[in-house]
Image: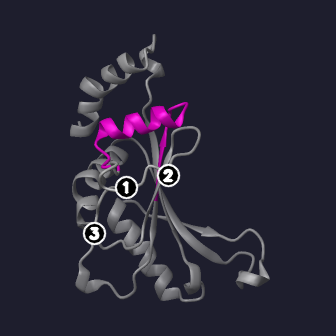
C-alpha cells in the first residue's frame, strides 16, 4: 500500500471527519482522479513534437496518453477538424496515489524558484488545477534529452463538496500552498 494512502486512511480521514463533523466516514473528501493534460499550442503540425509530448507523458505517468482531437475547425487558430491538439492521461487508484506522492515530495521542490503553489486553483467543488511551465522538474526526465519545453496541466479531482473542504484535504496530504509570508 502506498505511504500517502496509508497516511490518509489512518490520520487524515479521521482528522477531516472531526474538523468538518461528518457523521458518516463515506462523506469525508477523498481523491477521485488525477488528470495530466498538455496542449500543443503553436506546434500543431509538428509530428515530432507530438510524439515527444506523448513519450514525455508516458515516462512521467507510466501510462500511454490519449491524443485529444479537435471536434470542429477554428480558422482563427488554424485548427482543422480531426487534428491532434493535445494529449492527456487520467490516473486512478494506486497509480494516482503514487503520482500525488511523487508530485508533493519530489517534483514540486525541484521547480525553479519554488515558493509554494497558489491557492486560487480551486473550483467550487474542491478540485484543484496546477499548471507547470516546464516538465523537467519530474525525476524521470533527463535534462540532456530535452529538445523543446512545453507546459503541463495537473488537475486533482476530489470528492469534496466545497472549495474549503478540498483545500483542507490537499493541505493535510502535504500540498505546499503559499502562506501569507511567502506571497
Using a 10 Å C-alpha cutoff, classify the residue at mark 2 as few (fewer than 14 neighbours), some (14 to 19) or many (20 or more): some
Residue 163 in percent (x, y) is at 52, 37
Which residue is found at the position 34% from the left and 51% from the top?
Answer: 178
Secondary structure at badge 3 equals loop
Question: In the rendered structure, are the residues bearing label 1 and label 3 in contact, judged by CB atoms less than 8 Å apart?
Answer: no
Quarter location, residue 8? top left
Quarter location, residue 72? bottom right
Span highlighted in magenta in the image: 154-177
Residue 43 in percent (x, y) is at 55, 86
Q: Which mark is residue 153?
A: none
Quarter of the figure that contains the N terminus: top left
Image position of 45 with respect to 87: above or below = below
Residue 61 in percent (x, y) is at 36, 60
Question: In the rendered structure, are the residues bearing label 1 and label 2 in contact, judged by CB atoms less than 8 Å apart?
Answer: yes
Residue 74 in sight: yes
Residues at marks 1 and 2, CA–CA distance in whole angstroms: 9 Å
Q: Which mark is residue 117?
A: 1
Secondary structure at badge 1 equals loop
Q: Which mark is residue 113?
A: 3
Residue lying farthest to the front in this orientation:
181
Q: Earlier in the sequence, mark 2 or mark 3?
A: 3
Amino acid at each position: 500500500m502506498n505511504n500517502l494512502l496509508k497516511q490518509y486512511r489512518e490520520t487524515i480521514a479521521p482528522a477531516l471527519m472531526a474538523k468538518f463533523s461528518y457523521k458518516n466516514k463515506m462523506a469525508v473528501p477523498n481523491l477521485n482522479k488525477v488528470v495530466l493534460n498538455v496542449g500543443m499550442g503553436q506546434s500543431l503540425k509538428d509530428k515530432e513534437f507530438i510524439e515527444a509530448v506523448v513519450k514525455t507523458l508516458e515516462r512521467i505517468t507510466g501510462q500511454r496518453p490519449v491524443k485529444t482531437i479537435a471536434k470542429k475547425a477554428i480558422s482563427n487558430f488554424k485548427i482543422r477538424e480531426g487534428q491532434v491538439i493535445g494529449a492527456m492521461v487520467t490516473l486512478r487508484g494506486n497509480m494516482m496515489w503514487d503520482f500525488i506522492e511523487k508530485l508533493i515530495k519530489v517534483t514540486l521542490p525541484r521547480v525553479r524558484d519554488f515558493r509554494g503553489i497558489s491557492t486560487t486553483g480551486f473550483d467550487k467543488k474542491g478540485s484543484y488545477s496546477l499548471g507547470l511551465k516546464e516538465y523537467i522538474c519530474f525525476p524521470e526526465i533527463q535534462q540532456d534529452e530535452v529538445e523543446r519545453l512545453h507546459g503541463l496541466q495537473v488537475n486533482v479531482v476530489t470528492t469534496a463538496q466545497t472549495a474549503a473542504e478540498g483545500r483542507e484535504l490537499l493541505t493535510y496530504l502535504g500540498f505546499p500552498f503559499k502562506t501569507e509570508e511567502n506571497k
